[in-house]
Image (spheres, grey):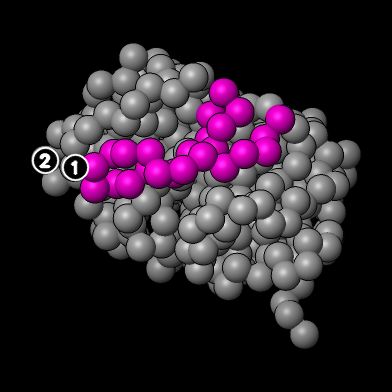
Amino acid sequence: MPDPPATKKLTGHTAPVYAVEYLKTNPQLVSGSFDNTLRLWDIATLKPLATFGGHTDLVLAVAIAPDDKTLASGSQDKTIKLWAFPEAPPEDPNAPLKPTGELKGHTSQVYSVAFSPDGKTLASASADKTIRLWDIATLKEIRTLPEQGGPVYSVAFSPDGQTLLTGGGDKTVRLYNVADGKELRQFPGAEDAVYTVAFHPGGKTIAAAGLDEVVRTWKVDSGEPTIAFSGARGDIYRVQYNTEGSQLIAVTYAANLAIWNTADGKLHSQTDLPGRTTYGAAWSPNGQQIAIAAEDGNVYLIDLPKPS
């Protein structure tokens, strides 16, 4: 399949890329791969700046602290690694940088990691059916949330950092109080495993999607369902709002990217992506680019038209 228009490619991983995240203050991006490494990329030159090594199995999750100083990753090796971003690119961008910290406690692969808005806490979700909260300063576990009915695939902090949203293999979307770990609410409607969850930037709406190929949204305070975004082709592996919250993307295992307008739920655009399979995506902070994690070992950068 030919690349979509205005598509660039980051090449360097030797196995499928599963997760991607943009830095907030620099034109850079991090990718996590089944080659057990993460890479830092310059998205202007399309060149690698650094490689992060230390995992002994597939990298499944990537998160970047709000201040862009710390990188976290989750892996099939059951651990979470932390790195400090280098102040200057190393001389050899392919020489793996060693982790500055490690979080151990999960008994199965770690599917998702997320920093709190203040950067002091990390949440992790695992196939061991649990979510754990970690203190970044001490590298100690704060608490383990109650075991769910299946693997937990996705976690996301609310914009104010007070609540945590999760999606799991037991078809549930749950909201927890970060302060005491208590479950506040479940959001009904998912008909199959939930792979991805997201908060609207305003904090009053959430989105979730997975194997049933529909992006569902709810009001946070009441749990009332709102718009269901349909039309994505394939199991949905990542949903994300843009910075303004005016649009929502979904990327599917079947290599399809859908973008909807959040105000009315209308499909804004749909693109078949390079490669046969895609696993993850990230929307750039300026809203002008979407990065795609692909099975063929590449990261694809799709430049979006600037608003008229």
Is residue 202 depicted above or below 112 in this figure?
Answer: below
- Residue 109 is left or right of residue 245, and the answer is left
> Which residue lies under the disc numbered 2?
138
Residue 128 on image: x %, y %: 40, 17
Q: Image point 19% across, 36% down: which residue?
A: 142
Under mark 2, the amino acid is: Thr
Give the quarter of the image for residue 255: top right
Is 214 placed left or right of 18 in the picture? right
- Residue stretch rendered in magenta on the structure: 167-191
Q: Is residue 235 left or right of residue 121?
A: right
Q: Quadrant of the N terminus?
A: top right
Residue tagged by mark 1? Answer: 135
Q: Label 1 crowding class (10 Å Cα cut-off): few <14, some 14-19, many 20+?
A: some
Residue toward you, 303 or 154:
154
Image marks 1 and 2: residues in contact by CB distance under 8 Å:
yes
Q: Would you identify the image quadrant in which residue 6 lies?
A: bottom right
Q: Which residue lies at the image location 83% right of the left edge and 39% below the top edge?
A: 233
| Residue 19 visible (yes or no) | no
Q: Secondary structure at mark 2?
A: loop
Q: Is residue 170 magenta?
A: yes
